Image (spheres, rainbow, N blue to C red):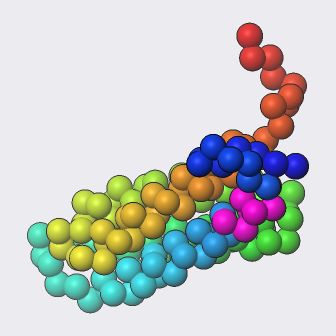
Amino acid sequence: MTMKSSHGGEHSVGQHMEDCIEACLDCARICNTCADDMIGMSHQAAQDLTARCIRLCRDCADICLLAAQWMGRASAFALRACALCAELCELCAGVCEQHAPHHALCGDCAKECRRCAEICHKMVVESVPAASGVNSQ
């Protein structure tokens, strides 16, 4: 089975899943690094934002790892994990973008989260059969 890649060519489902697993692992890595680096920061003006950012980075890292694991073992729930992963990655990216002026690593984290969200979203959309029983009229 193949699907169209974002570059217009054919992309096998297996290769797309490998790319998605890799993106999830990369995102988990930077989210954990970003959160760990923020612990103990003393920006009083951004204290609430820092705490929110740390929590979201940790949650994002967790769901990224779970999605990667479930895809890796062909879990029946892998696409659901990918959908949730895309959602959390978008949320994390938004908060990290707000926090980037106070923490340089947040800018890189936001970029990786957006990349992971895009790849996970494509994984979900392109893996769902067109004939899922829903009329598209």
Residue 40, placed above or below residue 59: below
Query: Most prominent secondary structure in the magenta stretch?
Result: helix
Q: Position of residue 65 (x, y in %)?
A: 64, 74
Q: Position of residue 71 (x, y in %)?
A: 77, 66
**Residue at image location 68% in from the left, 47% down from the top:** 9
Q: Position of residue 87 (x, y in %)?
A: 54, 52
Viewer can see residue 80: no
Residue 40, placed above or below residue 110: below
- In this view, the residue in front, 137 or 19, is 19
Left or right side of 88 for 93: left
Viewer can see residue 103: yes
- In this view, the residue in front, 46 or 123, is 123
Q: Position of residue 97 (x, y in %)?
A: 29, 61
Q: Quadrant of residue 76?
A: bottom right
**Residue at image location 38% in from the left, 64% down from the top:** 110
**Residue at image location 54% in from the left, 76% down from the top:** 26
- In this view, the residue in front, 85 or 120, is 120
Q: Which residues are magenta?
A: 14-19
Q: Quadrant of residue 38?
A: bottom left
Confirm whether the magenta stretch covers residue 15: yes
